[in-house]
Amino acid sequence: MKVAIGADHAGYRLKEHLAVLLSEAGYEVVDLGTDSEAPVDYPDFAAAVGRAVVHGEAERGIVICGSGAGASIAATKISGVRCATVHDVYTAHQAVEHDDMNVLALGARVIGEALAWEIVDTYLRARFDGAPRHRRRLDKVEALDRERS
């Protein structure tokens, strides 16, 4: 699986750590920056990851900022992105299984490296279950995305 990953300066170290673990686990990593802890703007990197996913350049995405909130908000502005800030394993799989989440947001100042990896691993292994109730709800979410005003 090809995974796009991007972070602002606050998420840089966690991004670097996760990129290594992803590669070691056999994932193809598309690193969309940033490349240091020098201050940058999280929307630029969240948008790059979101675009990579919706344009088929990656199957899943991961965005990282200090809290995960800003990166998630920015990523969801890209039509076709379904992103949530996740800081626990249950949400990591449930958001994929029920909501077909395709971009994961993490807060580097909220969780540590070990938990972040557990969340990422869980997210990437999860699959949308396609149950009728989940498909119906996802159809409504996608309609909202098309109707943005």
Image (tube, helix red, strand yellow):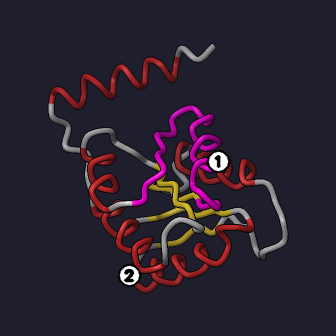
Give the alpha-carbon distance from disc 2 to disc 1, as whole Å.
28 Å
Q: State the residue at coordinates (31%, 62%).
A: 89
Judging from the image, what secondary structure is the residue with disc 2 in? loop
**Identity of the amino acid at label 1?**
Gly
Query: Where does the image place residue 30, in percent across and percent down from the top left?
Result: 59, 67
Residue at 51 percent across and 39 percent down: it is 81
**Residue, x 52% and y 19% (percent of image)?**
146
Q: Nearer the viewer, residue 132 or 54?
A: 132
Q: Mark 1 — residue? A: 70
Q: Quadrant of the N terminus?
A: bottom left
Which quadrant, please, contains the C terminus? Answer: top right
Residue 25: assigned label: 2
**Where 42 falls versus 138 (above or below)?**
below
Position of residue 135 relative to residue 3, above or below, is above
Magenta span has 115?
no
93 lies left or right of 60: left
SS for tag 1?
A: helix
In the displayed structure image, the side of residue 20 where residue 49 appears, left or right = right
State the residue in front, 117 or 110: 110
Residue 144 image position (x, y, % from top left): 47, 19
Q: Which residues are magenta?
A: 64-87
> What mark, if any, has residue 120 been given in the picture?
none
- Quadrant for residue 114, please give it: bottom left
